[in-house]
Each structure stands twice: as structure tokens, then as C-alpha cells.
Image (cartoon, rainbow, N blue to C red):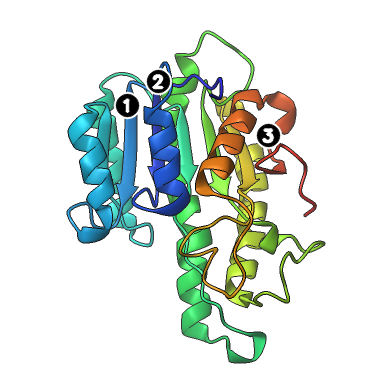
Amino acid sequence: MAGIQVCSVLVTGANQGIGLGLVQHFLGMPNPPKWVFAACQDPKGQRAQELQNLASKHPNLVIIPLEVTDPASIKAAAARVGEHLGGSGLNLLINNAAIMKPISLDNETLEDMTQVYTTNTIGPLLLGQAFLPLLKKAAQGSPSSALSCSKAAIINMSSSGGSIEEVYLWNYGQAVSYRCSKAALNMLTKCQSLGYRQHGVLCVALHPGWVQTDMGGAGSQKPPLTVDASVGGMLKVLSSLSEKDTGTFLDWEGKVVPW
């Protein structure tokens, strides 16, 4: 198991796929976080059934209602998390919630582009702003002066589909709005790393690999990575991140992904 040690973590889009996998891995650690906040759109809905089952067995798991495109919902989520944390801060914010529309260049529309960009890029921006006070509090309370995920960090779940150099899996699916939103998310990560460094917050964009999820496995080919393998790899990467990594774009094995 990865050696990451955090007191508190928030994962968005936590009711399925990679988000749910992250929650399960955090709960299964030998020394699990004191608080695991699992955020999703409809905590009482059918799609959050597995999360609800986990919450009934793990008192340190708190399900938080969150719509990442709604500023009021984001503020309410931050207030709720702050109440649970009491005087302590949030160590780790994982912006995992995302949508993808498998639409070709010729068929992209204003509506699709706006919806995908709002969820995948603006959501993480607003979440970073809303949770910054709690991240700063965690950083101030840390015994270490160096940046790390155990201190305070924002991890933006990106994709090498957003790499302008690689344009990963173009022939598998153009998904133009998704690619543009992830390229923009990478720039946001860089901006956050520069803006939040002074507060002791590490910021990294992470490519989880091509994973067997509803999103990743929507086409004819089967993705090579299981959720378990991807999440296990990413947690190892998170445990090793330090000052030199802030503002970088890495994959689930810790390799640098080209911008």
C-alpha cells in the first residue's frame, strides 16, 4: 500500500470510477485518514449506493453533496467540510469530477463546449478558491516547511488527452471539448502552483492512465488499466511528491507527461 499519510482528504466525483476507487483505497490504508470526504452530485441516489454502503461501515467517511458547476453548492460543501474538521485544515483536495462527450470536431457545439469546460476546468478553479482557507490552515499546522501531499495539496485529475504534444488516443475518439478542457486544466494547475505556493499548497495535474471506467471504456476497445491499478499507482506518486513537483503534469507511474 502507498505510504501517503494524510489526516483529511476530499475527493470529488466520488460515487463511481476513479473517484470511488480513491475513496476505497484511502479507507483501506493501514493508517487511514481521520476524515475522508466523498463528494458527489446526489448522495442519496442509486448511483451513490456503493458510497452509502461504505459510509455505513466507515465512520471516518463523510458523503458531501456537491455540484461542481454551481458556486453556491461549492461554498456549501466547503462550509460543511470545515464544520467536520473543526479547527484543523484539509490536507488534500482531489478534483476528480469530470465529464466527457465523445463528439468530433465537426459536431462540437457551444452548449457542449461550455458544459464540459464548466465541469472540467471552472469547477476545479472554484473548488481551489473555496477550499484554500482550509488548505492554508492544514499547511500552517504542518510541522514540515516543505511542500507535500501530507501537508496541503490540490491534485487535478487531468488526462494526456489534454496534452497538446501527445494528443493521446486521437483515433480512438476526438472528444474535442474534453481535450480542450483538460489542456486548460493543466494551465490552471500551473497557475495554482504559482499562486498557492506562498500558502504552502502543492499543486499537480495527474493523468490516471486509460482506465476501465464508464468514461474510459465507452468505446469499442477495452482500456488496459483497472481502477485498482491506476489508483494504487497514483497514491504511490502522491506519497512521493515534493517541492520540485509542484506545477507539473505526471502520470499514474510518476512519469512526466508533455504539455
Report x, y in % for residue 171.
73, 76
Position in image of residue 234 (x %, y %) = 59, 37
Determine whether the residue tagged by mark 1 lies in a helix, strand or loop. Answer: strand
- Residue 259 in the figure: left or right of residue 141: right
Asked whether residue 114 appears in the rendered view, the answer is yes
Looking at the rendered structure, the secondary structure element under dot 3 is loop
Q: Percent from the top left, x then y, of residue 38?
A: 33, 42
Which of the marked residues, 3 or 2, is nearer the chain's N terminus? Answer: 2
Label placed on residue 150: none
Q: Is residue 193 left or right of residue 41?
A: right
* Residue 129 visible, this orientation: no
Label 1, label 3: how many angstroms apart (C-alpha)? 24 Å
Residue type (three-letter) at the residue carrying disc 2: Cys
Residue 35's tag is: 1
Q: Label 1 amino acid?
A: Trp
Residue positioned most to the top:
143
Kindly indicate whether the residue at mark 2 contacts the one at mark 1 (C-beta within 8 angstroms): yes
Residue bearing mark 2: 7
Could you tell me which residue is drawn at 27 percent across and 26 percent down?
Answer: 60
Task: State the residue position of label 3.
Answer: 246
- Which amino acid, mark 3? Thr
Instruction: Give percent across and percent down for residue 70.
Output: 33, 60
For the residue pair 45 and 92, the one nearer the viewer reads as: 45
Q: Residues within 10 Å of mark 3 (few under 14, many from 20)?
A: many
For the residue carrying disc 2, how many other residues have a C-alpha within 10 Å: few (<14), some (14-19), or many (20+)?
A: some
Q: CA distance from mark 1 to mark 2?
A: 6 Å
Return the residue nearer the eye: 217 or 72: 217
- In front: mark 1 or mark 3? 1
How far is disc 3 from disc 2 in space, using C-alphas? 20 Å
